[in-house]
Amino acid sequence: MSHNALHRWWSWRAIVGLLVTTLALTACGPSVIDGAEVEKALKEWAEKIPGQDEPVTAECPATAKAEPDYRFICTLSDSTGTYSVRVTVLNSDGHVEWELLG
């Protein structure tokens, strides 16, 4: 398996999992998404990409507004580089989708 799997996905400039997931809202109230939960979901998703056989790290803002269409940028990193991921909040329940930016 190639250690460049994440890099290949990015190079194709593909939407790599316009993945919809529900994340835990922080104790701060129903209007905030916990960035650590987004990081965890991104990392788990990236490590399941076929051919991705090395550790991946994810970094996101500590919190994000749980408002429809609110967007923020996270990063995914492995030995091939660091890649930007745009996360879009779908609703106030904490549903989000993301795409790897190219």
Image: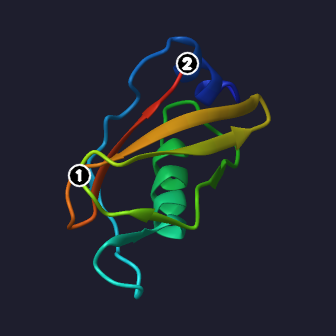
Q: Reply above or below: 28 against 56.
A: below
x 45%, y 58%: residue: 41
How crowded is the residue under tag 2: few (<14 C-alpha within 10 Å), some, or many (20+)? few
Query: Nearest the camera: 35 or 54?
Result: 35
Q: Reply above or below: 12 against 9.
A: above
Q: Quadrant of the C terminus?
A: top right
Q: Reply above or below: 79 against 39.
A: above
Residue wearing tag 2:
102
Q: CA distance from mark 1 to mark 2?
A: 24 Å
Q: Where residue 68 is drawn, which disc sits there?
A: 1
Q: Quadrant of the N terminus?
A: top right
Please state which amino acid type lies under the numbered disc 1: Pro
x 49%, y 36%: residue: 49
Residue 81 relative to residue 13: left or right:
right
How crowded is the residue under tag 1: few (<14 C-alpha within 10 Å), some, or many (20+)? some
Please state which amino acid type lies under the numbered disc 2: Gly
Q: Earlier in the sequence, mark 1 or mark 2?
A: 1
Q: Position of residue 85 (x, y in %)?
A: 52, 37
Q: Reply above or below: 41 against 97.
A: below
